[in-house]
């Protein structure tokens, strides 16, 4: 493990078919060989699982995110604002796969509104960031979240 820290790697959900002891030993040996070769077996497994994951588009994930988190929002108006900004202003992102969204894609959504409705653009930027962070946590997105700050939007206009 990296940095002297111990990590564990499971064999999968207990709800799925049981892994035989022989297969568990094979997995263990493969992981040891990967570590010896300088590879990270946990990261390799994560990348393989992402490759087999059904690609979900931003719009579908954003709608589910809002539905799940709406109970923590202050009021119904706040929920409506989230829904409206993500459907109206973020429309160009809605059909894109979560893993395909780049900094340029997010900037293309924000730049047209940045100088006219700065507060809306700022809130939308934060909402997109939260959704992409959640997508990464759920395994639907790899890599870093596009870093979009106020200066980025003004500089690229």
Image (cartoon, grey):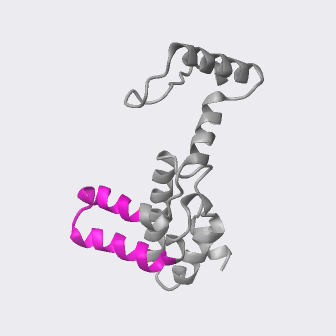
Along the viewing direction, whichever of 26 and 46 lies nearer the viewer: 26
Which residue lies most toward the right here? 37
Q: Which residues are magenta?
A: 62-91
Q: Position of residue 62 (x, y in %)?
A: 42, 63
Report if residue 77 lies within the magenta region.
Answer: yes
Screen quadrant of the N terminus: top right
Is 47 above or below relative to 79?
above
Along the viewing direction, whichever of 4 and 47 lies nearer the viewer: 47
Q: Position of residue 144 (x, y in %)?
A: 61, 51
Please state if 9 lies on the left or on the right of 68 as rendered: right
Residue sitting at 57 percent across and 19 percent down? 23
Q: Magenta residues: mostly which secondary structure?
A: helix
Q: Position of residue 97 (x, y in %)?
A: 56, 63
Q: Position of residue 135 (x, y in %)?
A: 48, 53
Along the viewing direction, whichever of 51 and 40 lies nearer the viewer: 51
Which residue lies most toward the bottom here? 116
Residue sitting at 26 percent across and 56 percent down? 72
Q: Quadrant of residue 17?
A: top left
Is 80 above or below relative to 140?
below
Residue sitting at 60 percent across and 34 percent down? 45
Q: Quadrant of residue 88?
A: bottom left
Along the viewing direction, whichever of 86 and 152 lies nearer the viewer: 86
Is 116 above or below relative to 87?
below
Screen quadrant of the C terminus: bottom right
Residue sitting at 28 percent across and 69 percent down? 78
């Amino acid at each position: 493990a990296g940095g002297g820290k111990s990590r564990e790697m499971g064999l999968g959900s207990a709800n799925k078919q049981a892994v035989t002891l022989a297969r568990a030993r094979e997995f263990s040996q493969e992981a040891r060989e990967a570590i010896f070769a300088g590879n990270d077996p946990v990261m390799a497994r994560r990348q393989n699982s992402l490759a087999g994951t059904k690609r979900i588009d931003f719009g579908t994930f954003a709608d589910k995110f809002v539905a799940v988190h709406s109970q923590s929002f202050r009021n119904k108006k706040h929920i409506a604002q989230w829904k409206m900004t993500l459907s109206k202003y973020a429309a160009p992102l809605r059909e894109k796969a979560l893993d395909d969204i780049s900094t340029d894609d997010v900037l293309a959504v924000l730049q047209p509104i940045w100088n006219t409705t700065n507060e809306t653009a700022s809130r939308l930027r934060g909402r997109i960031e939260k959704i992409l962070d959640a997508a990464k946590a759920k395994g639907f997105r790899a890599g870093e979240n596009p870093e979009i700050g106020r200066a980025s939007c003004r500089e690229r206009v």
